[in-house]
Image: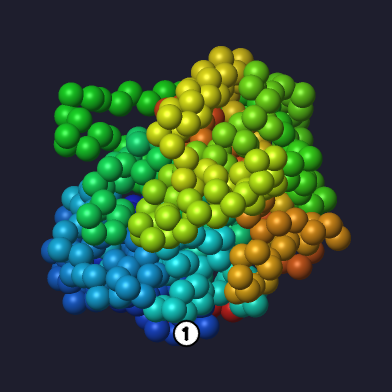
């Protein structure tokens, strides 16, 4: 079925003229028409422009049809981030990433759903509604790139672009059985993945691809991973695995942690991948850790994340938070108090925490002199059921224990704050048929290394498996 072929395979078909770009576009549009009513992954279709582009397709990608997360500017289409106040915001240009994809020959024909302000691990908002997981419609596909992941898993698109500050590429990839890549910070310019008036690159956040094959992640990175035009004096030469195989790898494993306990079935998938690597001859070390304790890394991530997020709120909200912090007891070091203080962090304090981040980055730099990748969980559980209660009322059940909702971002955060690349691979379904992923974290600019390891593991069977119930119309 064409719907579940990799983008790489479809490009080969297009180049061989086994199918035309226009025919392939019509094919995906027909699948969306037949099945998206129950998923709600696509929130805007740029059909007429896509048809014109497909009819004139050229470039290395030969007219590959694909979609992008709603948060990207795409000329003539809404860019709302799920925020009702921006429902009439129509982009006048393409984001840098969209422009590069089009120049490569992609036909970008639609946009996919997100949560309000991209600030949730589920994907729903008052403009576009709720996106469902193709493997279980009562569950979320993840967030904030949930529409991206659902579209790929349901066979509505050949390739997708998401973004990630707290796992927003990796969490949906895990929840929908896909491959996803969170790049090294600023490796791909994020210009145009923004609301009006935003020009600066965001702290911690990155943009990157989701796909049904690790080959497709590499395909996308080779088009996208170069500096923006303002940095025209810079060139990237990303290291690769070369001709190394699984037996040549040095792999550290962190299968669980007391700060974010994962379920037995998630931990078992980490050990399953580790066993595959060990049996192939790789050096697998379950004790190795970076010099800076993980507890410290998590602490700095939470502070820097919330400091960045706090800078984007309206002035009145910022002033309300200032008053709330002033009312806190001096010795209140609860999680809520720590986060609240971080949202109004002074520049003086930010500089101190940024210095600690630099220490963390160098700690990982030294660590990766002896290891190629770190194998870790993505989320504590498989995809959760839809839960649209206020954040403070949400908890996640992890084998009978209750976890605060946003503690789930631990596994994304400890590599995110260190600017490290991370590639998610499918590690097999649980007993209920829900996908579970694991992530491969590598050194800064080691993006093609983590993707390379993912390619090797895909050949060992850690591959995308389509959900049932989405036949061709």
Give the residue at x 52% y 83%.
38
Residue 282 in the image: above or below residue 129: above
419 or 295: which is nearer to us? 295
Q: Which residue is mark 1?
A: 37
Residue 336, position as x, y percentages in the image:
64, 51
Secondary structure state at the residue bearing disc 1: helix
Give the residue at x 43% y 60%.
317
Residue 275, position as x, y percentages in the image:
76, 35
Mark 1 neighbour class, 10 Å CA radius: few under 14, some 14 to 19, many 20 or more: few
Residue 446 in the image: above or below residue 121: above
Give the residue at x 64% y 22%.
292
Give the residue at x 47% y 31%.
349
74 or 173: which is nearer to us? 74
Residue 242, position as x, y percentages in the image:
46, 23
213 or 356: which is nearer to us? 356
In this picture, residue 277 sits left or right of residue 304: right
Classify the position of the C terminus by image quarter: bottom left
In this picture, residue 81 sits left or right of residue 41: left
In this picture, residue 56 sits left or right of residue 26: left
Residue 393 in the image: above or below residue 64: below
């Amino acid at each position: 079925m064409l719907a579940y072929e990799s983008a790489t395979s479809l490009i080969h078909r297009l180049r061989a003229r086994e199918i035309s770009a226009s025919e392939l576009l019509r094919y995906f549009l027909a699948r969306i028409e037949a099945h998206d009513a129950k998923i709600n992954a696509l929130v805007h279709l740029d059909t007429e422009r896509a048809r014109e582009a497909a009819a004139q397709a050229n470039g290395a990608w030969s007219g590959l049809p694909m979609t992008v997360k709603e948060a990207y500017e795409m000329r003539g289409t809404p860019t709302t981030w799920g925020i009702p106040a921006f429902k009439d915001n129509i982009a006048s240009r393409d984001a840098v990433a969209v422009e590069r994809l089009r120049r490569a020959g992609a036909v970008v024909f639609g946009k996919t759903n997100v949560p309000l302000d991209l600030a949730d691990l589920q994907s729903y908002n008052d403009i576009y509604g709720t996106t469902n997981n193709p493997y279980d419609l009562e569950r979320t596909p993840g967030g904030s790139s949930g529409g991206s992941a659902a579209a790929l898993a349901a066979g509505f698109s050949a390739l997708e672009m998401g973004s990630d500050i707290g796992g927003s590429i990796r969490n949906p990839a895990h929840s929908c059985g896909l491959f996803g890549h969170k790049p090294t910070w600023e490796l791909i310019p994020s210009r145009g993945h923004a609301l009006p008036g935003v020009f600066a690159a965001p702290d911690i956040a990155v943009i990157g691809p989701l796909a049904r094959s690790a080959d497709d992640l590499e395909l996308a990175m080779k088009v996208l991973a170069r500096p923006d035009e303002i940095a025209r004096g810079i060139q990237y030469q990303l290291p690769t695995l070369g001709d190394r195989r699984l037996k040549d790898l040095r792999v550290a494993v962190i299968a669980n942690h007391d700060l974010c306990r994962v379920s037995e079935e998630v931990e078992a998938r980490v050990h399953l991948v580790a066993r595959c690597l060990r049996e192939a001859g790789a050096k697998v070390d379950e004790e190795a850790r970076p010099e800076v304790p993980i507890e410290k890394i998590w602490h700095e991530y939470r502070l820097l994340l919330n400091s960045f997020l706090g800078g984007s709120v309206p002035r009145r909200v910022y002033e309300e938070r200032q008053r709330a912090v002033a009312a806190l007891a001096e010795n209140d070091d609860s999680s809520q108090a720590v986060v609240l203080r971080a949202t109004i962090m002074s520049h003086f304090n930010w500089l101190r925490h940024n210095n600690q981040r630099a220490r963390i980055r160098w700690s990982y730099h030294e660590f990766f002199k002896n290891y190629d990748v770190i194998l870790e969980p993505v989320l504590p559980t498989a995809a959760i059921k839809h839960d649209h209660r206020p954040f403070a009322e949400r908890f996640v059940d992890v084998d009978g224990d209750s976890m605060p909702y946003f503690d789930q971002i631990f596994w994304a955060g400890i590599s995110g704050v260190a600017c490290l690349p991370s590639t998610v691979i499918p590690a097999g379904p649980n007993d209920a048929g829900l996908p579970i992923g694991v992530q491969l974290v590598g050194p800064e600019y080691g993006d093609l290394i983590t993707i390379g390891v993912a390619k090797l593991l895909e050949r060992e069977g850690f591959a995308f498996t389509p959900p049932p119930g989405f036949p061709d119309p």
